[in-house]
Image: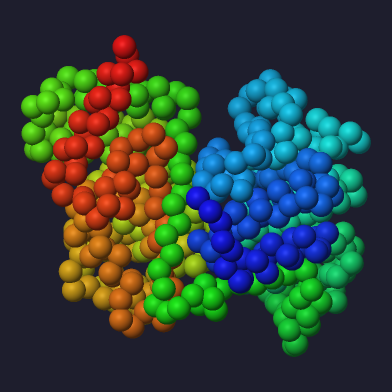
Amino acid sequence: MKFTPHPYQQAAIEAILDKPGVALWMEMGLGKTVVTLTAIDTLIYDACEVRKALIIAPKKVAEATWQDEAAKWDHLHHLRISTVLGTAAQRKAALDKPADVYIINRENTAWLADFYGRRWPFDMVVLDEASSFKNHQAGRFKALKRVRPRIARVVELTGTPAPNNLLDLWAQIYLLDQGQRLGQYITHYRRDWFMPDKTGGQVVYSWKPRPGAEAAIRRAIGDIVLSIKAADHLSLPGKVIDDIPVSLDSQSRKAYRQLERNYLIQADGTTITAQQAAALTGKLLQLCNGSLYDDAGEVHHFHDCKLDALDELIEALDGQKALVFYGFRFDAEQITARLKTRHSGLRFALLRSAAEAAAWNAGQLDLLLAQPASCAYGLNLQQGGHHLIWYSLPWSLELYEQGEARLYRQGQSQPVIIHRLIVKGGADEMVVKALARKDAGQEALLQAVKARIHEIRELEE
């Protein structure tokens, strides 16, 4: 596919090329990944200013997102990418592989810094979801701070156009300029720009900005931060599709393939009916989401790969509100359990009545979980937010379009950004292809199943 950058994307590319340290606060879905890869390609192959680039990303993003984006665009096909994941031995082997871009998950930042020490080889580092480096006391920040003098270029990517907490800025800006703008130490930053808020004796529990501090901080960092909102660059009411690839781990992929074979190969590829196809794909879509109902209705759990991807997406939204569409009852149960343990500060609800819809539209909820069939018609949810997450994609084109219409409708004041979690090599991809053809009826489902059965048989021959 040919990449023709929008003006705001070209501005972002030029900012990366022009500045040794730059933060792109670009709303999700606006193309941060292709923008950054395009700049990396230019710096390596045209300007010859970068030899090796390192991308530090959330684990599920590190597994597939950057790799898929490079494969998608014609001008990036030649980039050599090495994915540094797995055991220590696997990570070391990936680092030894000749490549232009190395991708590692953020949990291994300290390991990487310790592994190389003074031999640090990456002259460019990209922090995908830089807000995960906002804690100045965290090991990953300290590790990167230690090797920062050996890095010529740093790019920070964040999916929100503004931070929630000004105190969080210090660590992120330090990694860009090594303390030039907000000070060498967090204590000095707090002293100069903040005052105690909640205290207990001599202990300060929270801080608040001094009068005028927010505007002054923004001026101080304005030359190295590019903040881009969808509403500023897209015609309203616009719609952006953000497909998020989800990779299964090796054990889960093996289980999925075995169960896929058991379900599909037993079906007659020539006489299978649409009803059978619907039942088969229903099972496979369940597996994409991590669990499976047996004939007695009991749930059998296989993996958390899509749940982990949702986890990272919610973190990347950084407080922006989202409507989440799920497909199966166990989805709601597992998502709810995850939110309670990992995102206890978020306000969320399952859509069961008009009360939850009203709370969402009033801004009282951060996440609203809904089964699309329960709210496909007539329900106005556009006042509550502009992010929509498809945790499960429906085969029904009508249900899909009506689901999007809950936010993408008259009265929506911002571009709607639609995030679709898609398991690579799974039944999710069959649904995406059918929806793209505007042909997600029974016949499309039937043909998709027949095609997959044919592929499996060819692999076995």
Q: Nearer the viewer, residue 195 or 33?
A: 33
Q: Position of residue 299 (x, y in %)?
A: 25, 34
The spot of residue 402 in percent (x, y) is 23, 65
- Location of residue 284 by image quarter: top left
Q: Can see residue 131?
A: no
Which residue reaches farthest top?
461
Image location (x, y in percent) of residue 146 = 86, 46
Asked if residue 432 lies left or right of residue 67, the reply is: left
Q: Position of residue 416 (x, y in %)?
A: 41, 70
Q: Is any part of residue 56 visible from this angle?
A: yes
Q: Is residue 213 above or below residue 31?
A: below
Q: Is residue 394 above or below residue 166?
A: above
**Quadrant showing the C terminus:** top left
**Left or right position of 395 against 339:** left
Residue at (66% x, 40% y) in the render: 79
Colour theme? rainbow
Please name the residue shown 19% across and 60% down the image: 398
From what the image shows, is residue 267 above or below residue 298?
above
Q: Is residue 185 left or right of residue 26?
A: right
The front one of 240 and 315 is 240
Question: Residue drawn at (89%, 34%), measured in percent from left and top?
Answer: 119
Count how many numbered circles sit on residues in the image: 0
